[in-house]
Amino acid sequence: MRISLNGSDWRILGLVPTEWVWRGVGKPETNLDAIAPACPPWLPATVPGDVQSDLLDAGELPDWRHDLQSRACEWVSQRDWVYRKEFACSPEQAAAAARLRFEGVDYGCHVFLNGHHLGDHAGTYTPFELDATGKLTAEGPNRLVIVVDHAPSEDLTHGQIGWTSRIRIWKPRFAYQWDWCTRLVPLGIWEDVDLVTFDAARIVGLQVHPRADDGEENGQVHARVRVEGIRAFTGRLRLCVTAPDGTVAAAVQQGVGVESEMLDIDVGVTIDAVRRWFPNGAGSQPLYHALAELLDEEGRVVDTEERRFGFRTVHAVANDGAPPDALPYVLEVNGVRTFIKGWNWAPIDQLYGRAHEQQYRHAIRMARDANCNLLRVWGGGLLERELFYDLCDEAGIMVWQELFHSSSGIDNEPPTDLGYIAYAREQTEQIVPRRANHPSLVIWCGGNELTTASDQRPVTMDHPTIAAMREIVERLDPDRIFLPSSPSGPEFSASPGLRGRMHDVHGHWLYMGNPEHYGFYNEIDPLLHSEFGVEGAANLPTLRRTFSERYLWPPDATNAGWVHHGSWWLNRPRVEGLFGRIEDIETFVPASQWLQAEGLRYAVEASRRRKWRTSGSMPWQYNESWPNASCTNSLDYYGMPRPAYWVMRRAYAHRLVSAAYDGLVWKPGEPWHAFVWVNVSGQEEERLTVHWTLIELAGGEIASGAIAVTAGGGVGGAVPVARIEAALPERPGIVLLRLDLRDGQGRSLADNEYLFSTAGERPFAPLLEAAAGRLAVSAEGSALRLEADGGAPVFGTAASAKADWSGPYLSEGYWQVLLPGEARRVSVGGDGVVAVSALGQPETTIAFPAP
């Protein structure tokens, strides 16, 4: 029997380090309530959770997300925290063999049950069990006490400015301070706690290895079941595999005989006509279910264990034109090359201990809706939760899971001494089986931005620590790809001067200005671009929640609030270089967010134009762990999309029509040009037409045309369509390029738009200076209707759900420009309030379903 000890009925008490020892916290005679008057009081706590969240709920901490208040919370990680819980059990449970099962404690702990010291543990990512046999009572409440040690010091684990070569343990390093979060180090019981009781034998592990080779109709399931016996047990093991439709696909059983030992039992079945799991956008995600049952000689079920899994093959194959010494970076899924439309994933919250189920569900849904097919779980963060992997399985989002090394600013090489390598092996051996059944997991990686000390080049498979982890992965999870680090290859950074030598590279992370930004992305040719980004201001509602009025303005390094919430990513000079001097936050936010969206969109579209020389793009970052005033994320701390999210969603669509150009700024009357490209991800060949129009915002149409193109199918990669050109107007102003990709019946399949300027030193100031048109917002059934009906263009229109981490979910949410008289109709899914804003417009809210 498994009894969950999770819940909000725990209590915690903070003590200075090791005080719990001389206070006798774990001893049966100690009155725990009598300790409290000399200390802060016992406070309610939640498991899974973290101490800081409990203290915030109890009013013992200020809101760490607001102003500079996180600084007043840093003391928490320097104390030991005593968790206590009382629970009942039956006489049968008290008499049975018993184990306390912990899926994760962050970081070190000491466990006592009814005054008995059951054991100690250290390790955020590794589960553990302690023997509680004979320690339970049915006569009264059982008292469980867990002392969570204060956080390990920087001598053992380092924040961003430190030495990777000196780390000794694996605990999430980002929380010690990183460029996109504060210093706030969580402590607590952050995953499930269960009491497991049994009579003679139980199942302690189930690993499922499905296999269905490309081109084969049927598949095989190999299951390894680990059974623990505490005395002689004879019975049967039954394995049942259920198909995605709920029917039994296969079942088998065999005899089991076990003494007081651990026994591994291998079971195999054949599955007819398997349904294959595909990445998002390439097919469906059918999931199978394996149930292992341990039965006694009378056929009674003694214990069960279950896993969900999927059939798919994933191989890394060579990029087109790759150097002979390059690793393969193209993912071939079920025999089909799949372009990586990815993002980098940060922990869901700086205080990651609680379940955060609503946040996870919303974030993965938004990634799926944005056509994302891979998330890279960064090596300074977490072994992501089972829920994260379950949701990625269902959404078709592949996972690149890094092991727990990351760059440190001063040096980036993992330790190489034998003691540390042994530790890394031991940790990896426990971690890999925890997620190995998920079809979404496709890549294990040694860590983030690891380089050798001698030449600062990315580490290779030959690095002793990387080689040790690789051996574990290949033995325990042989169907996954392993990469030594991200980036990998001879060069770390993307650079036009390294053409032909860029394998997997990182950078750049800022908008580089006009025309430098466009020259950079037009010239680089990486095999994989696994980390890069562009910065932008947070959504205005998030800024107003983050800052009191004193810190809301100015958005630069003279403001302690903006420095505390994202000092690396402040971009006022770059924004004002394009828009001129800005004096209010309501104008600065849409201008800054436009810069981020423009820069990020161009980088991603450039990667798609290089398909299959480049195998994919993965911007840093998708989400953020705490509310930054300025950063590189596309989804903000409260789950609201920035404009960058919407341009990424378009750039990752099944069909993309894009423009390559040399820069944003042109001279009045100058000949203008751009090159049009089309991407189609599908396997079917499509005959399409690109319609283009160049429009002067202050005037009218300058030029237009239509070009036929064949894409998709055997064409495979990106298709260069044509160079388009026109003479620009003689007067200074703003010019809009619109692209529309249509099928043979004239239906629009994809569109895109780009802004250019002939306005001189402050090229986009006219967008802010012009009299704003009136934006009319209304509901039409389950749709949102937006119209610019004031006789002038409307700039920076954005729509989003009003509530945190929830819908309604929109089919589109950002428009650079709405021309006078132009209307947009947006599908709205789900109930709730939608907020609409634009430059110079008051926020409008509409509730759905509309009355």
Image (cartoon, helix red, strand yellow):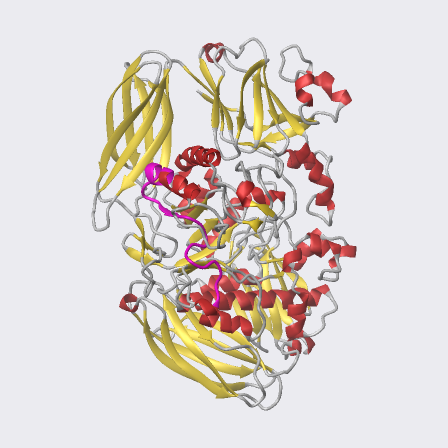
Q: Position of residue 750 (x, y in %)?
A: 43, 69
Assign the N terminus to one quadrant of the image. Answer: top left
The reply, left or right, for residue 701 in relation to residue 446 is right
Magenta stretch in the rendered image: 472-495
Q: Where is residue 448 in the image (x, y as percent from the top left)?
A: 49, 49
Q: Residue at 32% of width from left, 43% of height from top?
A: 479
Image quadrant assignment for residue 82: top right
Q: Which residue ends up furthest to the front in the rendered image? A: 454
Please tell me whether residue 705 is drawn above or below residue 56 in the rendered image.
Answer: below
Q: Is the magenta stretch mostly helix, strand or loop?
A: loop
Please tell me whether residue 9 is drawn above or below residue 522 in the rendered image.
Answer: above
Q: Is residue 487 magenta?
A: yes
Q: Residue at 39% of width from left, 61% of height from top?
A: 527
Assign the C terminus to one quadrant of the image. Answer: bottom right
The reply, left or right, for residue 87 in relation to residue 528 is right
Q: Where is residue 480 in the image (x, y as percent from the top left)?
A: 35, 45
Q: Quick one: 757 or 568, which is closer to the camera?
A: 568
The reply, left or right, for residue 786 in relation to residue 451 is right
Please tell me whether residue 781 is drawn above or below residue 137 in the rendered image.
Answer: below
Q: Where is residue 372 in the image (x, y as percent from the top left)?
A: 44, 56
Image quadrant assignment for residue 418: top left
Q: Count all numbered tags in the image, as a single digit.
A: 0
Residue 437 seen from this side: no
Q: Quick one: 344 or 392, which is closer to the camera?
A: 344
Q: Does the magenta stretch include residue 742?
A: no
Residue 779 seen from this side: yes
Q: Residue at 46% of width from left, 51% of height from top?
A: 375
Q: Quick one: 33 or 777, which is closer to the camera?
A: 33
